[in-house]
Amino acid sequence: MGSRCRLVTVLLLLQSFLLAAQSAPSPDSDHDGLSDSLEQSLLTQFSPHFYVGQHECAGIPAAFQPNLLQPTPQKEDGTVYGQVFPVKIAGESRPMVEIHFYDLWDRDCGAHGHPLDTEHVAVLVEASGSDPSEAQWKAVYWFAAAHENTVCDVSQLVRASALGAEENGAKVWLSPGKHAAYLAKALCNHGCGADRCDGMKPMRTSRVINLGEPGHPMNGSDFIASTAWPLEQKMSDTNFPPDPIARLNALPQDDIAWFNAGRHPAQGVIAISYTTGAAIAGSGGNTDAALALASGRTGNALQKSYHNTKHALGTTVKDVGKALGTNDSKTPQ
């Protein structure tokens, strides 16, 4: 009789322990209102499918030594870092979350290379209901950073439905050497002309590590705060502000929008300058703010833009050549 009582007592204690564990709130290590478990689940669900160059001079994205302020590459193993935080979008009542995926490299080995390289793509996801922990999540928009915050910025914004990436990660092409991200392979030679995405191969992501938030790093990611790279700044900015989203929503459903549409005429000049080795300023060329994905329209738009810019640039060079008395035979064809 006594042994039976002791068994019942143990079972009751175990049941109480399990109930208490189930009712305890899940940890929120970065203090952003989302549990660690939910953040990791979203990072896993929407992890992008990266493509890298077969002869990429920097190998693949690296894991960085934890618990160090100075970014210190540990191993090139295809580690991707993530950030997950809640956002408020005008007119949306359901919970929305912005997710950043960072591919961190030990170096940029393209033109004008430098040590350390922080690149990323982002996705805006929406919950199916009011309870984030119980909801199903669906991507609304994808963003890819390409030469971000430079004159060569060709970062892109697109609806997730156009990529077939509403419930999973999008395909992303990383230009060899520079690691600019593109949501369509055909876009890779746009901008200032230095990127090429030929001979690409799928990259196996070994793991996705949650960085936490600036001021509240997770998993030993103290290197967030280092001034040796702009990682903290990129983590502090949204990639889905109202103006680019409004411009995208005014386009057909399958179009990709430039995040910064106004910079592209100058990029056409730089692109041709890059191939000819000349530095020429000013151009009458113009590049569309949107590039269609369907029915081959992307390639047509790129080709038309290139030839328009090249023609305008050729006219400019001829005029300058006449004024200086130079030989017109050097004009790009």
Image: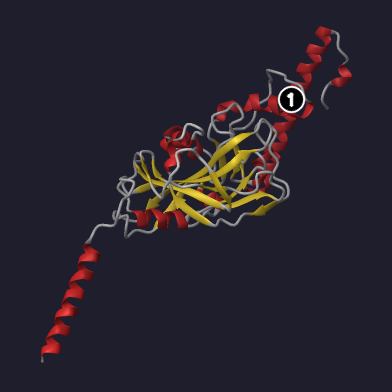
Return the residue nearer the eye: 245 or 55.
55
| Residue 183 spot, x, y in % from top left | 59, 45
Return the residue nearer the eye: 51 or 262.
51
Q: Residue 328's image quarter? A: top right
| Residue 185 spot, x, y in % from top left | 66, 46
| Residue 199 spot, x, y in % from top left | 73, 50
Task: Residue at 19%, 79% (x, y): give it.
Answer: 11
Query: How busy is the neighbourhood of tag 1: few (under 14 within 10 Å), some, or many (20 plus)?
Result: some
Return the residue nearer the eye: 247 or 332.
332
Element assignment for label 1? helix
Residue indicated by mark 1: 273
Task: Residue at 76%, 21% (x, y): give it.
Answer: 278
Residue most toward the bottom? 1
In the displayed structure image, the side of residue 296 where residue 218 appears, left or right: left
Callout count: 1
In the displayed structure image, the side of residue 262 where residue 23 appears, left or right: left
